[in-house]
Image (tube, rainbow, N blue to C red):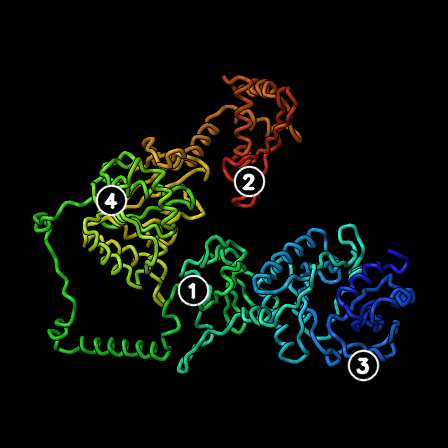
Amino acid sequence: MNNMDIDIESVKKSIEILKPNNALYEIRILLGSGKRKQTISGYFKGTDGLEEAFKKVDLRRANVFYTLNEINEGCYSREQHERFVQIDDTTSDSDIVAYRWFLVDIDPKRNSGISSTNEELEAAKTSAARVKEYLANMGFKKPIEALSGNGCHLLYSIDMVNNSDNEQLIKQCLYALDMTFSNDQVDIDKSVFNPSRVSKLYGSIARKGADTKERPHRLSQILKVPEKIRATERAALEKLAATLPQEEPKSANQKIRKNEFNVQDWLSSHRVGVARVNTTSDGAVKYVLEECPFNSSHKAPDSMVIVQPSGAVGFRCLHNSCMGHTWQDLRLMFEPDAYDDDFAEREKRIENGWQVHKQYMITRKTDDEEEVKKNLPVLQAISSYDLQQKDFPDTYYAVIGMIPEGETVIAAPPKTGKSWLMLDMCLKVANGEKFLGFETNKSDTLYLALEDGDKFEQERLNIVCQGDAPKNFHFVFNDVMHLNEGFLLQLDALLTQIPNTKLVVIDTLNFIQYHPAKGESAYNCDYRTGKDLKAYAESKGIAIVVVTHTTKMIHAEDEMMNVSGTNGVTGAADSVIVLSKEHRTDADAKMFITGRKVRQSMHEIRFNDKTCLWEYTGVAEIGDKDQREREEKEKEYFSSQIRNVVLNIANTCEGSWKGRAGNLMEKALEFNIGLKESNKQVGGFMSRMQGMFMAVDGVRVEKIDNGNAPKFWKIYPPIDLEEVNDGFIQIGEKG
């Protein structure tokens, strides 16, 4: 840095990169602010005259900018030719011949008029990396990467004439990036689309607010330049602009009322998880999804649904494999006929239904009740005695006491070995061998391994089979339709080819479950899926097992609540099995079994990583382990005389009391409280119950380490728990 308060060598290098071949550019210097703001301008070619020109300007309070795009050569003849002049006649949009750079300006969110902190700048760098990767997947060439001083710049070379269409295209691209990447930490500047836009001159100081240690003035600089700068084609910009949310398609007769379609309700009804909701400065609402519906490995914040104030809706996933998916694709995933149903026709059906209902109500009031009754469904009653006399075939069990005829739901966390479990179950039933200690009925088995391919399953078979696999164990890997598309017809046709099949495993449920009908709740859709699978299985006398995941939030009080989806998933099931682990890497797991055709039980199983088989290790106690531990801890706390000693100390001390376990036992004698515990047991109790002292009695107890010597305990007078926020302190919480 020299006495001009600018790094002139960095400036020259930047100009050589950004304005090659002696291209004309304007440098604009802004001094002061408000009414005292001054504009100093100069037109230059090359860098020969720059240093002398800068020496004549006081830059101590200045911010320096340059024009991004190609200027009409006529501007070079203005008064500020190769020098700086205080003047208002600067480059306007009409002076620009062509767009040469597409600028993405990522700026940290903060109060106006101040510089960014280092942490805020790091947030901008993180966002810049994500934008760069996203645009590379869109077909953009490598950008120049720079620091503006407070944020980050990505400069993409482009070659487009200056006209209204191209200006609109640049604007749409910036708005599309803003929709995707602006959040509570950074903003994508949407205002840099106009042709005569100026940007920070790299090599100059970015000055906003006071220059402090926390929010310093920084040098703007180019960080990285591609080996060869290549222009991004217009098609890539058009692809980016096309990601802006669009109005829902309407047919000629459709009359969609404003706010008729609620995106938030739609996401909820179709169980599309939302991680967070952001509202942009323009009033657009961005629903950041927990995971991409098209690829569950794409986690938040990489996929989102965006709703513009106009009602236009868009879907975005930042990963290349999902780049082409739109909001319409997302709707069609759950509602295959979403855009086939004409609104007017739907209104007509509703009106016809209403007319039929009115006619029925009128008919009810006539004397011709017998005629009305003929058209009503007939309800049949059976006496309890006759019901007792009826003969029913015995219920079939593929795995006795676990997998009955009908539908069974098996739920487990992702990647915890449930597919190994299903493979082993199919093998054991096919061979008529015990499965996890449960007897099986030998039969043909069918495994729809829809998450894996044939090569992968072959490798698994070779690991778990001792010799040749049974010929009565069959696989399906692909081309499975959803229930509303004809899955049961597919399955029925297949079972005619392998008629001795009594166990069918579908791994996983989401590949075949119903798409919700219009207006149908998620619960009803889930229940309809289970009900139809159950009805089909019972009609064939077979057991159908559907595999699904457990929720991320664990409900220790009710294993059934851990099954992903609504209660409708398990509502129709004849049997439900839930696998759980304390930690994902644990070999041990618990298997909870319940249902209308099985006895409720809890079992302990262990995954053998050498054989890749689950092994039965015993019966587990059903109950909430954490709850039992809490109850035992509370019982110990309330029954202990040590608690009484501590409370007496807390109520009588001034300021605080400090002492070792032995001193606490001495205080017990003062209060006529007999303690049978040793010093070590007293210390252990104090360690375990620190949180309980505060949560129950409002007494703060501190443990003070004393090296290898016995620890000190510091006890404070009690506080009024009513003044503590409800729920801030939990029973059993550590202090």
Query: Three-letter amino acid code at disc 4?
Result: Lys
**Which one is in front in this view, the residue at disc 4 or the one at disc 1?**
4
Q: Is residue 574 visible?
A: no
Q: Earlier in the sequence, mark 4 or mark 1?
A: 1
Image height check: is 431 above or below 296?
A: above
Could you say which is closer to the camera, residue 709 or residue 150? 150
Residue identifier under label 2: 721
What whole-number distance in Å separates the C-alpha atoms at marks 3 and 4?
85 Å
Secondary structure under tag 3 reads helix
Residue identifier under label 1: 266
Query: Three-letter amino acid code at disc 3?
Result: Gly
| Residue at 88 percent of width and 71 percent of height | 84
Contact? badges 4 and 2 (CB < 8 Å) = no
Q: Residues within 10 Å of mark 3 (few under 14, many from 20)?
A: few
Q: Earlier in the sequence, mark 2 or mark 3?
A: 3
- Determine the image quadrant of residue 598: top left
| Residue at 34 percent of width and 56 percent of height | 478
What whole-number distance in Å separates the C-alpha atoms at marks 3 and 1?
57 Å
Query: Three-letter amino acid code at disc 1?
Result: Trp
Count of all numbered marks drawn on residues in the image: 4
Q: Could you say where residue 238 lies in the image, as x and y percent from the top left?
A: 57, 72
Query: Three-letter amino acid code at disc 2?
Result: Leu
Contact? badges 2 and 1 (CB < 8 Å) = no
Question: From the image, which quarter does the C terminus lie in?
Answer: top right
In the image, taking residue 222 as reference, residue 88 lies left or right, namely: right
Q: Residues within 10 Å of mark 1 (few under 14, many from 20)?
A: some
What whole-number distance in Å separates the C-alpha atoms at marks 4 and 2?
69 Å
Question: From the image, which quarter does the N terminus lie in?
Answer: bottom right
What whole-number distance in Å separates the C-alpha atoms at marks 2 and 1?
43 Å
